[in-house]
Amino acid sequence: MATRVSPMPLVAANWKMNPNDAGDALDLVRGVLSVARGHADRVEVAIFPPFPWLLGVSEVIAESGVKLGAQDCFWELSGAYTGEVSPAMLKGWCEWVITGHSERRIYLGETDEMVAKKTASALGSELSVIMCVGELADHYDAGTSDQVVEAQVRAGLANCSADDSARLVIAYEPVWAIGTGKSADAEHAYKTMRLIRRVVGELIGAGAARKVRILYGGSVNSGNVESYVELPLCDGVLVGSASLDAAEFAHIVKVTAEVYGHR
Ligand code: PGA
């Protein structure tokens, strides 16, 4: 079996609909900047603020090596789609975009088909994409997590090819672990990430799949991050609540850098 050369880990900060104040957003990003910059050779850090704060945050992180991303995009590149933001609009000053976050699936009714269209459109616009997948508590309790996650991966990547692999990241986020403080145990996370890598390999070929990074997300904090990033198949973390505390997020970046420095 070919040895897997680990790509650089990714630590992503999903601020969701926070903070409400532009000044607080800039303070928050300034707070993580020096730590992120100090580990830029070992960890890729990407910040995902709400749309209105993208410009201000982009000015603060300019030349720092810290990357910027949007939390969502539409699949069309322009046109009569009130309220939507296209990948073409993001391209140029954002490198990243998140697709398929469970909060959009739940609160806005996003389907696997919509996620697939958004993912393909963003990749086609040369953005890098974190596509989120994860089972609900009911699935977890019923023991059907694997089937649900596999179906989401297959549907979400329906329009992707091997050429997209280096810009594609899949975040495994069990929905019952998001914002609940109830993070998944490392073994469950590992088994699901292994399943995701196998499925991605079937879809785009094993060689290309090795370039796709797989993250864990769901109540990651400075106390539990090590248990995920030390998993051999885990290429980083997607952090929600803990990314709103600059010291906490900086600690997550530091722990990730230390763990990967020893791999
Ligand atoms: P959480 O959110 O860290 O607050 O659980 C993670 C996410 O939704 O990406």
Image (cartoon, helix red, strand yellow):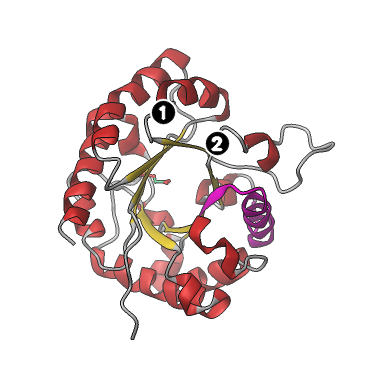
Q: Is residue 96 above or below residue 3?
A: above
Sequence-wise, which precedes: disc 1 or disc 2?
1
Figure quadrant of the C terminus: bottom left
Q: Which residue is mark 1?
A: 63
Quadrant in the picture for the N terminus? bottom left
Residue 197 appears in view: yes
Left or right side of 141 for 201: right
Q: Amino acid at mark 1?
A: Glu
The magenta segment is: 110-130
Q: Does dot 2 land on a helix, a strand or a loop?
A: loop
Label 1 to label 2: alpha-carbon separation: 13 Å
**At which x and y percent is residue 54?**
53, 27
* x, y percent for residue 8: 33, 54
Q: Which residue is mark 2?
A: 94
Residue 70: image location, x then y, percent: 54, 38
- Image position of 157 (left or right of 60): right
Residue 145 visible in the current orientation? no
Above or below 179: residue 112? below
